[in-house]
Amino acid sequence: MKFDRKKGYSKDEIENTIDKYVNMHLNAERNRAILKRRLIDGLTHEQLAEEFDLSAQSIQKILYKYEQVVFNHLSWHK
């Protein structure tokens, strides 16, 4: 899922939400960077895997775990 500003979320809103809610976990800084590159910059799983030296499957797991958290928090604040 690519971040879509048409949904009404600004880059700052999504970035702040990622920073606030993806911070209590192992590798939190890396995971925040992955989420930002995916949701804001639109990189594919394969591009992210190459950039972060992880498998595409690992990227998919990270995104699956945190994308819903981010979008849930964004939708609660609208």
Image: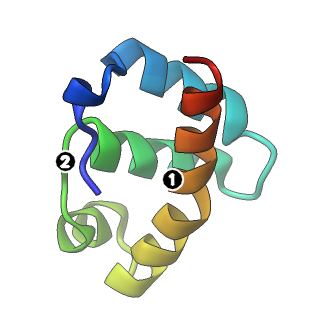
Q: In which quadrant will I find the C terminus?
A: top right
Residue 28 horizontal side relative to residue 60, left or right: right
Question: In the image, is 58 to the left or to the right of 75?
Answer: left
Q: Secondary structure at mark 1?
A: helix
At a point 28% along the width and 35% down the height, the residue shown is 40
Can you tell which quarter of the image residue 24 is in? Answer: top right
Query: Residue 47, position in %: x, y?
Result: 18, 65
Q: Is residue 57 above or below residue 47?
A: below
Colour scheme of the picture: rainbow
Q: Residue 37 versus residue 75: which sits nearer the camera?
A: 75
Quadrant location of the N terminus? bottom left
Q: Nearer the viewer, mark 1 or mark 2?
A: 1
| Outermost right residue | 24
Residue 4: horizontal and vertical position, in percent? Answer: 23, 36
Across the whole image, how many numbered discs are drawn on residues? 2
Disc 1: which residue: 67
Task: Residue 54 in the image: state x and y as whole percent.
Answer: 40, 76
Amino acid carrying mark 1 in the image: Glu
Q: Is residue 23 above or below residue 2?
A: above
Circle on res. 40: none
Crowd tier of the residue under label 1, counting other residues whose Cα lies within 10 Å: few below 14, some 14–19, many 20 or above: some
Give the residue type at disc 2: Gly
Secondary structure at numbered mark 2: loop
Q: Which disc, if any, is residue 42?
A: 2
Image location of residue 9, percent across then percent down: 36, 21
Residue 5 versus residue 23: which sits nearer the camera? 5
